[in-house]
Image (spheres, coloured by chain):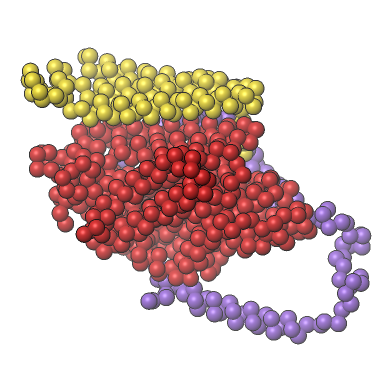
Amino acid sequence: MIWEFLANNSPALIIAIPLIAAFATSLISRVSTRARNIWVILALVLTEIFVIILLYQVFNFGTKVYVFGASSYNLTLPPDSGGIPIRIIFVVDAMSIFMAFTASTVALAGVIYSISCENEQTGQDKYYTLLLLMTVGMLGMMLTGDLFNFFVFLEINSLASAALVAYRVDRGIAVEAAFKYAIISSLGGLMVLFAIGILYGQYDALNMAMVAYRMQATGFSNLDKIAMALLTVTLAMKAGAIPMHFWVPDGYGKAPGAISAMLVTTTYASLYGLFRMCFTVFGLAANTVTLGWFLIILGVLSMFVGVTMALVQHDIKRLMAYHSVSQTGYMLLGVGVGLATLGTTAFNQYGLAAMEGGIFHLINNSMYKGLLFLTAGAIIYRIGTSDLDKMGGLGHSMKYTMIFFMIGALAIAGIPPFNGFASKLLIYESVYQFNPILSIIAMIVSILTLASFVKVFHSAFMGPKRYDVKEVPLPMLVGMGILTFFIILFGLFPNIAMQYLVTPAATALSDPVGYITRVLGGGSL
Amino acid sequence: MNLDFLTPYGFWNPILWLLVIFVALLVAYLIWLRGNSRYKKGTEQTKPFLSGYAPESKEAMMVSASNIYWGFTSTLKGYYNFLRKMHTGDIRDYLGWYVGIVAIMLILYILWGGA
Amino acid sequence: MLFNLVYITVAIVIIIGFYAALFKRNLIKIVIGISLIESGVNLFLVSLGYREGGIAPIYTNAPSTYMVLPTPQALTLTSIVIGVATTAMLLSFCVVIYRYYGTLDARKVRRLKE
């Protein structure tokens, strides 16, 4: 009974728990610092548990809907509504819950890491409040099935993360980074809202499924094209695709350690939005080949320019931020190939595999890029500089950090047996059948990635001892350990991830008709 | 549980790969064991040889991060100069790129966007 | 006639906002530009919901049943609230930047580049 209630209401609880916890944090921190830390970790552990419950449900019983304020949680079309879903609906398909699992895991690792990384800093109450709000924003973007609700969560996420980027002022430089990030994201948010307005004006609906259904029924107008351009380009910018990536190195490079790791999943929430718009909202009416090539070209540009810019950086976090841009390119490439071949026979031959590769890479990159940012944060926590020129010899004293860094670096470079290899292999092989040149570029980028991380490893950990430091405290190692666990798990047993997370996600994303019928079919299965 | 990770061309088995790499490392270790161990520690034999120059201090021998891959970047000087010009750090240029891409995509979508 | 005039106004406000954000050097003026774009988008949302002669959807003692769906108004209110938060945050960033850099010139506030 109680189990059923919790399971049915889990989409709402996933949002509600961190949201309530965020605003209660300032109250609880009046009690004691320790109580607050336990409170924040507890909130995210609970969120993670509900995400796993929902994951189980979606895996076994298919896409789940949750209607806010209705008499029954799955009543998408109330009898008196005239066939329109008027309420805010959360539509949790395999792709959404896959993203939510990624986000909540990285958030959990980040918050455990923060407990000791931030414990000598000021203003921790607000730090944790903002961190939880940022998590709410991410999870909301991933679970919602309503366009305006998506905008609201996008803005919650942008505001919280911009404030967190600026949190450690660093002689104003972090604030400069945050200012740029905030300008970009508020302009992006406004353009998303404008596009939503255009769609609402034409279709009298804000529900994604309803908009997609009516768009297909009435044909694709020029106004739709304007909305599509605004939505896809803005979300690509928020996902950090080149040539609109400039805010990424600024924002990631200046954020506190754990926040950089969480910003990675934040950008992937926007990337998820981009995929959702391309497949579900516009996928039926628009020309998917054009959309697919848009993603592919952005992906190839991001991969190549990102990695070549990373090679010349000498700030450790900025370097990793450029790699983040570069790795996003793989996902855009993989999913773009899937989108370009959608509906043809090629989709079953290699398109679906390319999408699986792109989506698998998404979770892999969240884990190892999160881990790398956490190790960078650990280095900065101990020696106080992020300049690689001033580092050296840390391998003598920070052995565990070094091991974690090595695992992350090998995984990002696609060296077996870590998880980066499995997803890159899928992308290379399937993209090779689509267009060999793209696949070759992807491999070159992978080599340059390895070269760049060899440089970081050499500069930070090798060489004679320059700093007399200790290993970082246990909570930071635990935070890194959580992510390492998934890297090794998905590396040694990629089938676990494929079977339970990736293949359902790719299948759900490539099936807009199923999504629409689930929502407009009246709620019952 | 099936351990073979299927890809469009074939399969990938990480456990098998680990076994193979373990055997390869074992072979490498056996070869290493057969090496000559009769060198004298602390003499000229174990010092780095820098074309006859006296070795510098250990700190000075470390190549700093900015200088690694100098050859690569100086070969691609034209490309990197273009990238440097692109990354101005001016917020208005960030917005400009965004507006430009929206405009380009708008034209492309109007031409080829419809099904 | 009147109907299109609203959309032309929306376009003009948004274009002025983009002009300010793209070509003005002072960071505060850039924030004003963003704020103008926001006003344009809000105006667009409100004008979408406008129906001539429609009344608010309050059924008690309603003179007619020709009512307006309140969704666009609700969206606009939410958007205004978010806009206030964004503008406040951006302006407070400007304050901190001025305190440390001594300038608000966008050409000089670029210590992060490449």
Report x, y in % for residue A81: 12, 38
Across and down, in percent, residue C48 comes to 24, 25
> With A518 as the anchor, is A307 left or right in this view?
right
* Residue under the image location 31 percent in, 62 percent down: A56
Which of the 4 image quarters holds residue A21?
top left
| Image spot of residue C93 (x, y percent) | 54, 28
Chain A drawn colour? red
- Residue nearest the viewer, comparing A363 with C74: C74
Residue with the most extreme front position = A31
Q: Quadrant of the N terminus of chain B?
A: bottom left
Q: Chain C is drawn in which colour?
A: yellow
Q: Where is residue C81 in the image (x, y as percent from the top left)?
A: 36, 27
Q: In which quarter of the image is the C terminus of chain B?
A: top left
Is residue C53 among what the camera can see?
yes
Q: Residue at horizontal 41%, vertical 39%?
A: A23
Query: In the rendered picture, chain B carries what hue?
Result: purple
Choose between A360 and A387: the one closer to the eye: A387
Q: A125 or C107: which is nearer to us? A: A125
When the figure is inspected, residue A45 is found, relative to residue C26, above or below; the finding is: below
Observer able to see residue B97: no
Q: How many marks?
A: 0
Side of A442 where A151 appears, left or right:
left
- Residue found at x 35% / y 55%: A51
Choose top left, top right, bottom left or bottom right for residue A152.
top left
Residue at image location 15% in from the left, 54% down from the top: A524
Task: Look at the picture and state if A191 lies above or below C33.
Answer: below
Front residue (pair C29, A159) = A159
| Quarter of the figure with residue A356 | bottom left
